[in-house]
Image (cartoon, grey):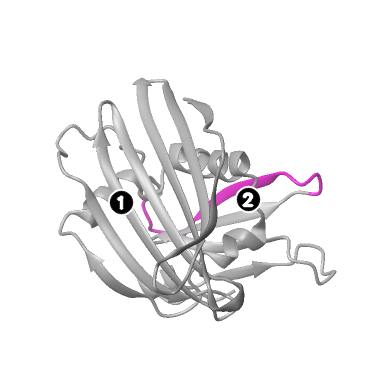
Amino acid sequence: AQFAPWPTAASQIGLLDQDGDGRLDGFVDVPAEGIFRLYRQRSDGTLTVETFVAGGSTPQAYSETTRRLDEGIARQAGTSIADLLSRRPAGPMHVVGETADFSRAFSGYLTGNFADASRRESAARTRQFPNLRGQPVRTMEVITPMSGGLALRQVVVLPGPSGQELWEEMTTHIVVTSPFQTEVEMMMTRETRTTGGAVVGPRSTAAPMRFRLER
């Protein structure tokens, strides 16, 4: 796929058909300027995340630790390539609201600087965009400092059946326990709502999932 210059590239994706059989094996997106991130489904069903750096770009803009974190989150959640694509922008993004320090906070996440002691307040961003199917998607991201790390809360609102909406929420606690170890805990909920925001039926809550990143 041919990507536009940054920052337009952030709202584009490239699809991967590895063996030409017409089946989707993965996709590429651009999490930071000059960084190409490949989500790929292996033949054994395992999801992997790989990165490629364009010439002249700074590899630290998307750290190896964050790559492994994103890979671990996708694996623990049992997320498929189709699920990931449904939440990804594939067209113009509209920022509905953003706090002044969100860009800095999210940059810290991407670079693996999870325990930035200088941050004291939460940072948030809300966006709207079309996904690959042309469906309207709304997202909210909140980054909150915590002792030794941060909490990343992500809410994704997707179109559901009968004019309803599917609300998916994931909160990830990332705590750096030593220079060589980071503990991760994920909590996920799903619920259906009307377009007016009223909850329809029971909320689905998954048991907390935990894993560790060794450096």
Q: Nearer the viewer, residue 57 or 12?
A: 12
In the picture, the quarter occupied by the N terminus is: bottom right
Q: Name which residue type carries label 2.
A: Thr
Indicate the secondary structure of the residue bearing disc 2: loop
Q: Name which residue type carries label 1.
A: Val
- Residue 35, given in percent of the width and then of the height, sits at 45, 57
Where are the magenta residues, as a range?
43-58
Q: Is residue 45 magenta?
A: yes
Quarter where residue 119 is shown = top left
Indicate the secondary structure of the residue bearing disc 1: strand
Q: Which mark is residue 171?
A: none
What residue is shown at x 35% (from left), y 60% (from top)?
140
Q: Is residue 85 magenta?
A: no
Task: Locate residue 34 relative to residue 145 in the image: left or right.
Answer: right
Tell me how far mark 1 sits from mark 2, CA to CA.
Answer: 21 Å
Residue farthest right in this picture: 21
Q: Is residue 114 shown to the viewer in this render?
A: no
Residue under circle 2? 79
Task: Locate residue 100 relative to residue 55 in the image: left or right.
Answer: left
